Amino acid sequence: MLNGRKVLITGHTGRIGQAIAERFAPICDMWGLARYSREGSWEETVATGLTPVRGDLGRGSLDEVPTDFDYVLNIAAAIHPATTDEGLVDNCEGPARLMSHCRSAKAFLHVSTVSVHKYSDDPRHVYTEESDIGAGIGSAYGISKLAGEGAVRAGAIILDLPTVICRQNVQYGGAHPDANVIEQMIDRFIETGEVPVPSDHEYFNSADYLYDIPDWIEPCLAAASVPPAIVNWCGDEAINWVELFEHIGQLIDRQPRFVKVGNFPFPNSVQDPSKRQSIAGLARTPWKEGFRRSIEMRHPELTLTKVER
């Protein structure tokens, strides 16, 4: 679908965007839109095979950005906005401006988050694409991403631009220098032997392996519509936090010491993968294999034991 096409991607200097860019840059004319504020990021983009173009979705001019893209992949997000207003500029106004600028595209893919859902205190609750939304986490990030979905929905209708909104779960994998929440906990376990767990409930998520995500790009673009289609991006399995670290403990030959905390920082986030499976198939990487690969990449100094999958 993307072979030989002109494609714009944002967020390619981050984890998910980088994995997608590495997959598709060799087969299409891919452009990377970013601020390029991190030293070396421009050169890294060129080395990956993208044409870099400097811009700021929410604040700056897009005059240097072409308008004749076949497809647009908006992966970028302000994960830790200082204020809700700052989050609205980056996560709401930015995607809407990009849609308007690239209104002639065949399809627009926008990455949102499971955090837009109205939170359920049932640890086994499964969020479908139709589950209530309401920024359950209550953070500036969750609120602004929810508003961003509204802006993208409106933009698709106003511009008659086929769009798909992909609600990303927590992902893991790769050796990117920015460790995400799960990898921070794994690093802590490797360093100290401790693993925080909720004091009063179980914790489950349906984390997805980073290098499975590019498999879903073309099928999701094919599902783009007006009004937008919504697809959960998550792993196929609900992962129990304790079972996860017991498995990691077997891999590194170290028994985890579970420490109960009253303010466990992550809400349960199990999503229903069935819609994504129907359009893109099963995820290629079971979670036990995915975490093995992730630890091998992030901690090459460790020799992992063989554990039955």
Image (spheres, helix red, strand yellow):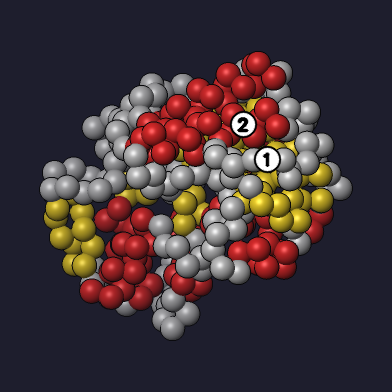
Image position, residue 229 (x, y; %): 60, 25
- Is 245 situated left or right of 54 in this image? left
Q: Residue at horizontal 14%, vertical 55%? A: 260
Query: Is residue 280 visible to the viewer in this orientation of the structure?
Result: no
Label 1 amino acid?
Leu
Q: Residue at horizontal 75%, vertical 38%? A: 71
Front residue of this view, candidates 296 and 237: 296
Image position, residue 100 (x, y; %): 68, 27
Image position, residue 167 (x, y; %): 50, 36
Front residue of this view, candidates 251 and 38: 38
* Number of marks: 2
Q: Which residue is mark 1?
A: 62
In the image, which disc is placed on residue 212?
A: none
Q: Residue at horizontal 76%, vertical 56%? A: 51
Image position, residue 305 (x, y; %): 41, 77
Residue found at the very far right of the displayed protein: 4
What is the distance, in whole Å, between disc 2 and disc 1 at their CAs?
A: 9 Å
Q: Which residue is mark 2?
A: 97
The crowding category of the residue bearing disc 2, from other C-alpha atoms within 10 Å (few below 14, some 14 to 19, many at least 20), is: some
For the residues labelled 2 and 1, say whether their Cβ atoms are less than 8 Å apart.
yes
Element marked by disc 2: helix
